[in-house]
Image (cartoon, helix red, strand yellow):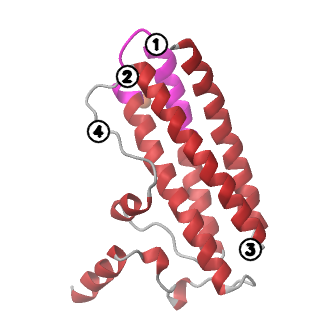
């Protein structure tokens, strides 16, 4: 019990910043400092992807108004694409010997987009908020590609390029819808 509590206490201080336990330090030719930097860059992207997945599903579930069918289906499609990126990104961190997300609490500490707990959000506002969040995430992903590439981790950089392309696809759709909602 004490061991468990200590582990939890450690996590509260930000587990991704801790030294990686020997059993999880996957062998790599990347430098430990580079692994740490990449993990610290990619893990908030994992947290943001989960936060955006939940927000997009939240809007999928709580949508109202004349665009119901269109937006309901679009949000579902976008949520699925976001969720797909989560495992791929988290496993990249593990492949280079970093540690990744452990819990909902850790997601909360690392996410950079805000949760949305409002009971009613008009559909035009849903589009506006998702567009803003996806724009923010695209910016973070672009910065992360640069970090990975300069640290010699081209596979994570390449994966992020595909993920950024998907983010930009969502932005394109949301942007066009935001025009028609004006
Ligand atoms: Fe559904």
User: From this viewpoint, is residue 97 visible?
Assistant: no
Q: Are marks 4 and 3 in contact (CB under 8 Å)?
A: no
Residue 168 screen position, x and y as percent: 67, 37
> Does 88 appear above or below 37?
above
Is 67 in the magenta? yes
Front-lying residue, 46 or 146: 146
> Does 133 appear above or below 8?
above
Crowd tier of the residue under label 4, counting other residues whose Cα lies within 10 Å: few below 14, some 14–19, many 20 or above? few
Sequence-earlier tag: 4 or 2: 2
Residue farthest to the left, as pictured: 1
Specify the label residue 63 is tagged with.
2
Q: Nearer the viewer, mark 1 or mark 3?
A: 3
Q: Are marks 2 and 1 in contact (CB under 8 Å)?
A: yes
Q: CA distance from mark 3 to mark 2?
A: 43 Å
Disc 2 secondary structure class: loop
Q: Judge: label 3 CB < 8 Å from ligand 1.
A: no
Disc 3 secondary structure class: loop
* Quadrant of the rendering where the N terminus is positioned: bottom left
Is 176 in the magenta? no
* Residue labelled with disc 3: 151
User: From this viewpoint, is residue 164 visible?
Assistant: yes
């Amino acid at each position: 019990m004490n061991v468990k509590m200590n582990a939890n206490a450690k996590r509260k201080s930000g587990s991704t910043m801790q030294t990686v336990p020997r059993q999880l330090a996957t062998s790599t030719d990347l430098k430990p400092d580079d692994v740490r930097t990449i993990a610290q860059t990619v893990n908030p992207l994992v947290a943001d992807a989960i936060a955006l997945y939940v927000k997009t599903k939240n809007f999928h579930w709580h949508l109202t108004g004349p665009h119901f069918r269109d937006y309901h289906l679009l949000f579902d499609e976008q949520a699925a694409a976001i969720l797909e990126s989560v495992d791929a990104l988290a496993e990249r961190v593990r492949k280079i010997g970093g540690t990744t997300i452990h819990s909902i609490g850790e997601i909360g500490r690392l996410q950079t987009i805000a949760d949305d707990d409002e009971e009613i959000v008009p559909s035009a506002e849903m589009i506006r908020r998702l567009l803003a969040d996806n724009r923010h995430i695209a910016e973070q992903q672009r910065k992360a590609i640069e970090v990975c590439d300069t640290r010699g981790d081209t596979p994570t950089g390449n994966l992020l390029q595909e993920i950024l392309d998907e983010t930009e696809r969502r932005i394109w759709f949301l942007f066009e819808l935001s025009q028609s909602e004006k």
